[in-house]
Image: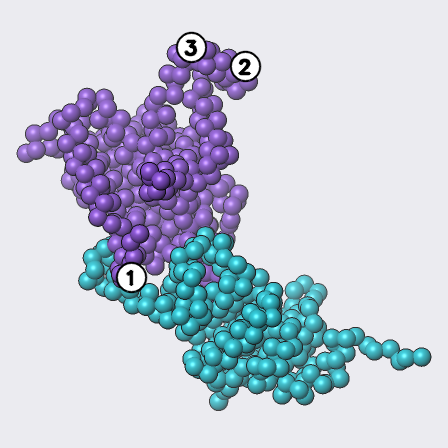
Amino acid sequence: MSLFSLNHISKSFGGVQALSDLSFELEEGEIFSVIGPNGAGKSTIFNCISGLYTPDEGSIQLAEKEITGWAPHRIARAGIARTFQNLELFRYLTAVDNLLLGRHIHMQASLLRILAMPFRRSRAAREEIAHRHKVEEIIEFLELEAYRDRPVFALPYGIQKLLELGRALALEPKILLLDEPAAGLNNEERQDMIFWIKDIRDQLGVTVIVIEHNMELVKDISDRVLALNFGRMIATGQVLEVLEHEEVRKAYLGEIPETT
Amino acid sequence: MKLKRGYFEDIRIFRNRASRFWTFLFILVLALLPFFIKAYYLSVINLMALNVIVALGLNVLVGNTGQISLGHAGFVAIGAYSGALLMQLGLPFVPALLLAALLTALIGAFLGIPSLRLEGPYLSIVTLGFGLAVMVIIGRMDVFGGRTGMSVPKLKLGWTGLPYDTALYYVFTITTVVLVIITIILLKSRIGRAFQAIRDSDIAASVIGINVSHYKTFSFAISAFYAGIAGCLWGLYLQFVTPGTFSFMMSIIFLATIVLGGLGSVTGSVLGAIVMTYLGLQLENIVGVPVLGDVIVAFSDSLMNTSGIANIKWVLTGLILIGVILFEPMGLNGLWLRVKRYWRLWPF
């Protein structure tokens, strides 16, 4: 049985069929890429999986549990974390606070316990400190040391991108959804991102789904690729197979006219 | 430059020995104050304390959670009336205070439910309607004395032998100090962080596992709890409450207080409430200032006055707020932070 499966998902907005009858399965520890031209429905897949949209038809299963139609916060608790194409960070909080918010689902202190937090031995204080240590591990992993106490809005774009990845990692998810992790990054930052995504899979054993336009990154990291156009799957399989696929080429380059 | 040695330093209340020293000195001064100043000033401080309590709660809701309330006077009214009623029924002060505050919190949680679907201008209309409705409903209930109002039982001082004003002063300042500390702790905790996450991006908050509707409702409840406590104490302060006391204008002034003080900051709530209370009592006196007073009176009479009642106070409050938003958007808290930074480097 696979870790995660999407079965016959359809979603439309008014007259626009954003996704139609889409299915795929993920094995544990896999890096799975979704490619396709703009408007193909890639981000809609993520929004359906993370619960921001409810699919019109079909079901989504995580570890044999049906999670279709769950609220986003329940899905996060079930073990799915994500990043956004256009960054959704908590802009007026510091980097550390953003990462600590990623630990929110693992913290339990109730209001009454929190009132005792100024005492070093209180349960709330110990919990807070334990999670601060976890956050420090992530800071070390992503080399964010220099930015700890800076408010997010003052950080450079590449660092914000990384911080959002860190926040998703802080949830300790089973599945990580990355929406265009390399968009807006320069060459060097993109190389780093490739390195980190591989590390996340190899060291932390997280299953990753990536939406990406940058083919260098897709070729480099993916175990399997799915190509999407107008909400339909047009090809799936090994990276090179999919990229060579005729319909995929057409989707990206358009119909190539016969030369006269 | 001092380096951190442990993560506990991030969550404790006093950042260093100096701040602990000054805080304890301040509390000591507060404790001894009644023996040195006139009763009038004591009552001014009492009024400041009431405003501080409301501002703390409102700032958690508006500044930290990013919701809005134009009806906070309604919560204060509920706290005042339910507290008065409970004390009339013979409940001792402390249980009556807590029960009144809890009741207000419950109503706050109910009002929080529309906030799950409404945002910005729509939510402000709902809360505005709430504030107005509370006044009307209370005015029609005989148990609360209708429009004529009801008298609030006095505190039983018993063994303390303090003058009444002084006793109120102690009750008010102790409550305020406790609530300031609770607010600071709350905002450093996972709950406070969740509030701020919702303010900055509710989508991101939901996908990292924060139950947004739960926390929004909770924020309304906490905010109402503070207003309920302030309301119950307000009753003691006035000794007689009428629905007219808790007018729409009061709600607006509460909002102005936290904007003046600085949104999302405890220091801001405290400073804002102190300054705003003082201005509320003293602004009218500007009429006596030679040239300036005449100009302002003329301005108010010719352009701002629609009802024939002098409104110099409101005109000036409005001008001050515009000034704050233009020149110091972080309010008094921003000013305070800059002064602190300046002195840290002094004399270099």
- Mark 3 residue crowding within 10 angstroms, few (<14) / some (14–19) / many (20+): few
Proximity of marks 1 and 3: CB atoms separated by less than 8 Å: no
The Cα atoms of the two marked residues, 3 and 2, are separated by 19 Å
What residue is shown at x 16% (from left), y 34% (from top)?
Answer: B31
The residue under label 1 is which amino acid type?
Tyr
What residue is shown at x 53% (from left), y 43% (from top)?
Answer: B121
Closer to viewer: mark 1 or mark 2: 1
- Under circle 2, the secondary element is helix
Disc marking residue B302: 2
- Is A97 left or right of A241, judged from the image as shown? left
Give the chain coloured purple: B
Quarter placement of the C terminus of chain B: top left
Q: Which residue is mark 3?
A: B290
Q: Which residue is mark 1?
A: B7
Task: Tell me the subunit letter for badge 3.
Answer: B
- Mark 1 residue crowding within 10 angstroms, few (<14) / some (14–19) / many (20+): some
Please identify which colour was used for chain A in the image.
cyan
What residue is shown at x 36% (from left), y 67% (from top)?
Answer: A136
